[in-house]
Image (cartoon, rainbow, N blue to C red):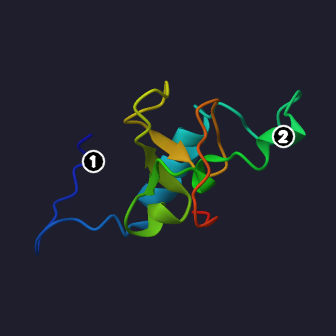
Amino acid sequence: MNTGREVSGGAWTGDDREHNDACHERWLQVQHRPTGQAGYRDGWYDAQCGGCHYWIALSGELGRDWGVCTHPTSAFDGQVRFEHDGCDRFTLRQDGSFG
């Protein structure tokens, strides 16, 4: 996506509030298990992407809520995922950390 903005001084770090907010809103539209949806199961709460062994947080400001799924058998492998989303391939982190 070309926004018409020029970046100088090296690699862009993604620390642009307007851009990050737009990404956040756009990406929320493709959640698999939004916590507010009808039919959300209580058991899914403890199996969210942010606690999965295969979820890697993005760097910068977006990394507070967003990461990439790297589970080779997940339908979401290679996709940006919201930390509170989830899938049936969830694998608990051994250290119990989240995000």
Q: Is residue 60 left or right of residue 91?
A: left
As drawn, the label of residue 3 is 1
Q: Is residue 50 left or right of residue 59?
A: right
Question: Closer to us: mark 1 or mark 2?
Answer: 2
Residue at the (57%, 50%) spot, across then down: 52
> What kind of residue is marked 2?
Gly
Quick one: 77 or 65, which is closer to the camera? 77
Residue at the (33%, 64%) spot, across then down: 14
Snapshot quadrant of residue 42: top right
View extreme (left): residue = 9
Q: Is residue 27 left or right of residue 1?
A: right
> What kind of residue is marked 1?
Thr
Q: Is residue 74 left or right of residue 83?
A: left
Element marked by disc 1: loop
Residue at the (16%, 64%) spot, across then down: 7
Give the mark, 1 or 2, whose residue is nearer the N terminus. 1
Residue at the (22%, 65%) spot, across then down: 12
Q: Where is mark 2, residue-wise?
A: 43
Snapshot quadrant of residue 87: top right
Quarter holding the C terminus is bottom right
